Image (spheres, grey):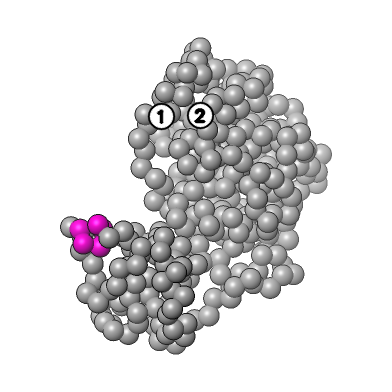
Amino acid sequence: MLFRQLFDLESSTYSYLLADAAGREAVLIDPVFEQVDRDLGLLRELGLTLVFALDTHVHADHVTGVGVLRARTGCQTVISRRANVGCADRAVAEGDRIVFGAHALEVRETPGHTAACLTYVTADHARAFTGDALLIRGTGRTDFQQGDARALYRSVHEKIFTLPDGCRVYPGHDYRGFTVSTVGEEKHHNPRLGAGATLAQFVDTMAHLQLALPKKIDVAVPANLHCGVPLGVPSSPEAPAARAFVPSAWAPVEPSAAGVPELVPEWVAAHPGVARLVDVREPDEFDGELGHIEGAEPVPLASLGNASARWERSAPLITVCRSGGRSGRAAL
């Protein structure tokens, strides 16, 4: 089997290319939107045909590349049936198999980081692609997207630690430079789950992590529920775009990587009054130390739906927040 481990520096995400050396059919696990051209170039160089693009879960820290890969190659997209992603070609469950050439990946449901996490295991049980369920000497967090520490503890012990000790573990992320581990190593050395750590100890550990939310969560999750397809890109080679991106006549609007129409801050600052300016942050942020743009009206994201129902639909409008996440959700 041909195998490549790929890395996205911004999100510290690993993607994995596996292929049948004889038949040249390939699968790509957890592709990243910004790396699609890199991945397509590698497929061309190696003479491979992408037949499946797989996600281990609905990611919160980056936009998936599965939808764009489908549009550009005709491959099928795969995700857990529990994810409720209607655009996916295959919604898989425990025991399903993803076949490419003479090889196959076995699907194991490993919820806990999210309610819809999957681990993909090669048919010979030599490699496990664990997403964010099991990281090298760590685990994914369990404090959002229906995360559940008890479920994650059971998932790892029942679905991953039951694999052979020599099975290589390939995680969805790493932040310290590690690339691979083994089931045996993690059973003995993982500080959260290994060395006899009990369920109660793990639940207590996860309850006290106090991690900041991923900076892209407000854009990544909505985009990934639509297979990561930006505005104006068809969801499949045959399908039209669900919402076409229309260039603006009044401003230099460009779609972001997640398909959100954006303006650079410098342009907004240089053109006061050209559009309705809506600040979707909370009131304490609007009046807080960072201040707000002169002329902006405060409309918290949670109340935007009711407020916008009274606005003129054809008038130009710009939404703003602190980092782009909430204003991106407002725009979509």
Amino acid at circle 2: Ala
- Report the predominant secondary structure element of the magenta stretch: helix
Residue extending farthest bottom:
249
Q: Is residue 136 above or below residue 274?
A: above
Q: For the point 66% across and 34% down, which residue is it?
A: 109
- How dense is the environment of label 1, judged by Cα within 10 Å: few (below 14), some, or many (20 and up)? few
Amino acid found under the numbered disc labelled 1: Ala
Circle nearer the N terminus (1, 2) = 2
Measured in 3D between alpha carbons, the distance from the residue under mark 1 to the one under mark 2, in whole angstroms, is: 8 Å
Tell whether 185 sits left or right of 159.
Answer: left
Q: Residue 30: x, y in percent?
A: 59, 46
The answer to whether residue 278 shows anywhere in this view is yes
Q: In this view of the protein, which residue sits in the foreground, 63 or 46?
A: 63
Could you say which disc has been placed on residue 207 in the image? Answer: 1
From the top left corner, tell me how far across and down residue 322 is, in percent: 31, 60
Which quadrant, please, contains the N terminus? top right
Q: Residue at x 46, y 62 (%)?
A: 329
- As drawn, the residue found furthest toward the left would be 289
In the displayed structure, would residue 51 be above or below residue 148? below
Looking at the picture, tell me which residue is in the foreground, 179 or 206: 206
Q: Residue at x 36, y 38 (%)?
A: 211
Q: Which residue is mark 2?
A: 149
Start-end of magenta stretch: 284-288
Q: Answer yes or no: do the residues labelled 1 and 2 have beta carbons within 8 Å?
A: yes
For this orientation, the residue located farthest to the top is 196
Crowd tier of the residue under label 2, counting other residues whose Cα lies within 10 Å: few below 14, some 14–19, many 20 or above: many
